[in-house]
Amino acid sequence: MAPSLEEPITFQSYTQTKAKLDSAWPESIVVSAPVAYEPGRTSVETHDAYDHDDLRPTFPNVHWDPLTEVPYRDRGLHGHPKFRNLLNAATDVFDYNPKIGTEVHGINLAKLTDAQKDDLARLIATRGVVFFRNQTDFDIDVQRELGQYFGKLHKHATTSVPRRAGLEDVHVVYTDEKSKDQRALFAPTFLWHSDVSQRTLLPSSPFSDGRQVTYEIQPPSYTSLKLLSGPPRGGGGDTLWASQYAAYDVLSAPMQKYLEGLTALHSAAMQAEGSRGLGRPVRRDPVITEHPLIRTHPVTGWKSLFFNPGFVTKIVGIPKAESDTIIRYLNEVIATTQELHVRFQWQKNDVAFWDNRISVGNH
């Protein structure tokens, strides 16, 4: 088998492996490498002593009332059309590709003015996902404060929350060196999804299950995610996003027109059943909600697909065979159309923001 993350090594075992390899070569050509490197192998970090112990995951056994719609006016509507309040303080800004993904340097997210926050919302609504590197001051309390500026934070019915009390609106993504590899449990298209409003990424393996909530009566708008700890560079754990603006654009004009007249059912049932199957509580009864397949974004005025692979169970008002075919087709569009995608390689203290209404992620 080719070397991969399934065979991680510690720095000590690297030294031993190198010594064994060197001994197989004639003494005259043995050369000391300037860096420790084994193809496809990375060192494994242990987390017995962990800096963020209060944010480790827990699953409280409580029950919440059903969600209802709340008044909402998007802060992006107040942002500058050219994002000048935000970008005037930046040292660099660049797009990952024409369709989705922008990285901004020189901004301290913990010290944004209200005008800069509005510009940030507008930039996220425009670009789908926006990245900021090395945000050491952006702790969980500041992260929640910024999220609350954009709107009411969402509390997820099944995912883990931090041990620290009062953070029920934070979704902890946690895997460590003892976690099982769960990738084989899901089809590749199923891993594409929309998300919750606030997330904190703790130790992460190449796969971590982000929980999508397009089934809510009022799905979240913006989500923020910060990496506190994760694999070293090249160790996996990247996140992909797909633009649903771009997904709409790649459809033919007749297909666009056809889908604009349809709605889809988004179901929380499978997610709730999965949690119960693991012996975990479901804190809010699962719902099934009907949403249009094509939406117009309130900030940009652009049309986008609104489709969540794995959680859209039915297209309403058409025969089942037709519904199943459309679902398979839209799954393929999102999963395989490369111009829709952006890939982000995380480093410690990096932060990503994305708009759930017009992007889906694969974490």
Image: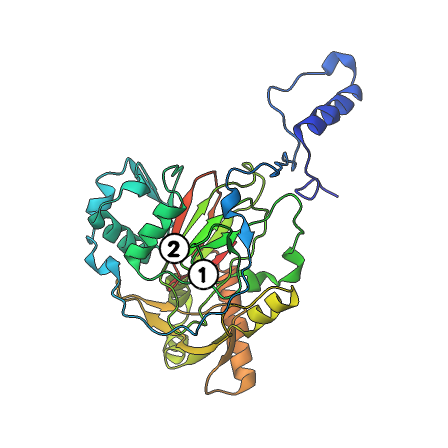
Q: Quadrant of residue 72?
A: bottom left
Q: What residue sits 55% from the left and 72% below the top? A: 328
Instruction: Tell me if I can see residue 100 in this picture.
Output: no
Instruction: Tell me if I can see residue 6 in this picture.
Output: yes
Q: Nearer the viewer, residue 136 or 79?
A: 136
On the rendered structure, is 124 left or right of 343?
Answer: left
The total of numbered circles placed on residues is: 2
Residue 211: where, in percent of width, then height? 51, 61
On the rendered structure, is 91 left or right of 237?
Answer: left
The colour scheme applied to this rendered structure is rainbow
Q: What residue sits 48% from the left and 87% below the top? A: 318
On the rendered structure, is 356 left or right of 55?
Answer: left
Residue 163: where, in percent of width, then height? 51, 51
On the rendered structure, is 247 left or right of 89?
Answer: right
User: Is residue 277 shown above or below 162?
Assistant: below
Query: Could you classify mark 1 by the number of other residues whose Cα lies within 10 Å: few (under 14), some (14-19), or many (20 or more)?
Result: many
State the residue position of label 1.
Answer: 195
